Amino acid sequence: MEFKQLQYFVMVVQQSSFSEAAKKLHLSQPSLSKAIKNLEFEVGFQLLERTTKRVQLTESGSVIYERALQILHEADILQQEIKEVKWTGSGSVQIGMIESVKNWLPSILHAYRQEFPSMHVKLIEVLGRGDVERALRQYAVHVCLTNQFIEASDIVTIPLYQEQLAVVMHPEHRLAGKDSITLADLEDEAFIVTSVGLQTRQDIFAAFAEEGVRMNVCYEVERFETIVELVRENIGISIIPQKYFAHRPDPTIVIKTTNSKTLTRTVYLTYLKKRYMPPAIEVLIGSIQMQRDSSVKWKEGEN
């Protein structure tokens, strides 16, 4: 059995047509048909049902098709890893990230750029837990900075720092001039929150539930950027990571911390345990870990 035979077979299935598959593969249709017949002869059973209108898998062919997809995917990964063997040159690194690390990451990248000026860095926003796992396993990113604790045997999860979740409001809000804010002060306020499935939302809801305070959720949005713009228009208040904001003053909003000990979150570095990383990317991972806050503690049961 040849590797090309599997490629041809998968293409025929995906196109549901020998003629269309032949066009995609830049082959003549007779050559493609012969290759598939040879494959069927080698496996010892029919893989495809051929009709005048379309081509479809036999029951046995479905099993071979799924396995062929896995083999071709592994081959693609192998080719990618071969390209990544070199230190850098025209190399690139893809970093998955949450929106709030925008003010934490630049200093690391600036130092990295001094050491590897030809390295191309691509930042990709990756939010939900499932998105983080898929991005890592599908090689869409080399590492991911996330507030999701990923507990999986093939993924390394390292805590980097903890950050306070801060209350954001319009300067004219009734609480803007108050020195100290509690979660109880925020009950019945019109809240703007992130979408269902995002960890920051879960952290906030958990903190309010723990203190027995009701949240009045009026708006749900995807990005902190949108939340801040809505707050600027005095539409509602919100709670977002304090590190999202730059240190320079912003007169259009008021940022307040509360006395809640649970209104915090941890940011993690995650990457695939067994993925080969070129030396230049290993250096970047090391640089990120060097910025790790030694005061960060694992949650109970994490290791």
Image (cartoon, rainbow, N blue to C red):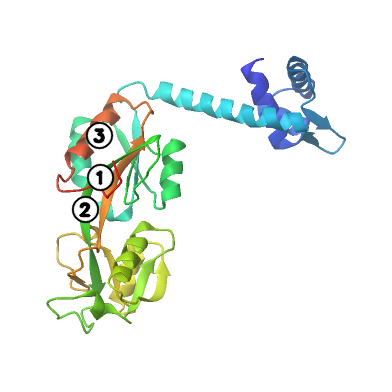
Label 3 or label 2, whichever comes before in sequence order: 2
Q: Which mark is residue 284?
A: 3
* Residue at the image point whose x is 64% and y is 32% from the top: 66
Q: On the picture, is 166 further left or further right than 21?
A: left
Residue 8 visible to the viewer:
yes
As shown in the figure, which amino acid type bears the numbered disc 3? Answer: Leu
As shown in the figure, which amino acid type bears the numbered disc 2? Answer: Gln
Residue 104 visible to the viewer:
no
Give the residue number, with chain letter if any, for mark 1. 159
Q: Position of residue 160 (x, y in %)?
A: 23, 45
Badge 1 crowding class, 10 Å Cα cut-off, few under 14, some 14 to 19, many 20 or more, is many
Q: Are marks 1 and 2 in contact (CB under 8 Å)?
A: yes
Q: Position of residue 224 (x, y in %)?
A: 33, 63
Badge 3 crowding class, 10 Å Cα cut-off, few under 14, some 14 to 19, many 20 or more, is many
Q: Position of residue 112 (x, y in %)?
A: 21, 35
Give the residue number, with chain letter if any, for mark 2. 162
